[in-house]
Amino acid sequence: MVKNTGRPGYLQIADDLRAQIRGGSLAPGAPLPSTVKLAEQYDASLSVVKLAVGVLRTEGLVIGQQGKGVFVRDTTEQPPPADGDTAGEVAELRAAVQDLSLRLAKVEEQLATSTTRRPGRSSR
């Protein structure tokens, strides 16, 4: 389900889960599917799914319970974020930088292996 739109996959997944929470498909107190199930559902890696869930945690939409899972938080119990509150934005930027760092490392690794000389080939 993650589309090649230029928007990071974890943000696409977070957007979809957020819409399900706000739309009532995932009610307060309901558990999110496991990370493995979400990865299968969105055809994404576990790390991408974990980043998406992290975004929702930062936004206060879900809460993790050690050994039990991640559950939709009852948003009526918490006050809305204050104007100018940038904590969510900072967390999203950090996650984006981490994602870009991983992608850059893969590209650099591919570039390094593709530019190494192969035996028997001329360098001309």
Image: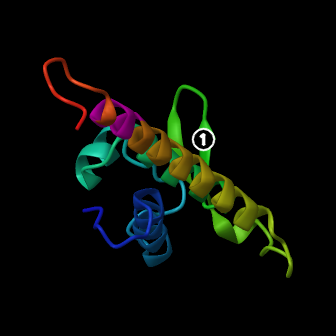
Of the pair 66 and 101, the residue shown nearer to us = 101
SS class, disc 1: strand
Q: Main secondary structure of the magenta part?
A: helix
Amino acid on which disc 1 is placed: Gly
81 is higher (above) or lower (below) than 42 = below
**What percent of the width, then of the height, locates residue 9?**
40, 59
Which quarter of the figure has residue 108? top left
Q: Is residue 81 visible?
A: yes
Asked if residue 45 lies left or right of residue 47, the reply is left
Of the pair 37 and 122, the residue shown nearer to us = 122
79 is higher (above) or lower (below) than 73 = below
Q: Residue at 40% of width from left, 68% of height from top? A: 16
Q: Residue at 34% of width from left, 42% of height from top? A: 45
**What percent of the width, then of the height, locates residue 54?**
58, 49
Of the pair 45 and 82, the residue shown nearer to us = 45
110 is higher (above) or lower (below) than 60 = above
* Quadrant where the C terminus is found in the figure: top left
In the rendered image, the residue lying farthest to the top is 119
Q: Which residue in the protein does label 1 denote?
A: 64
Span of residues in magenta: 109-114
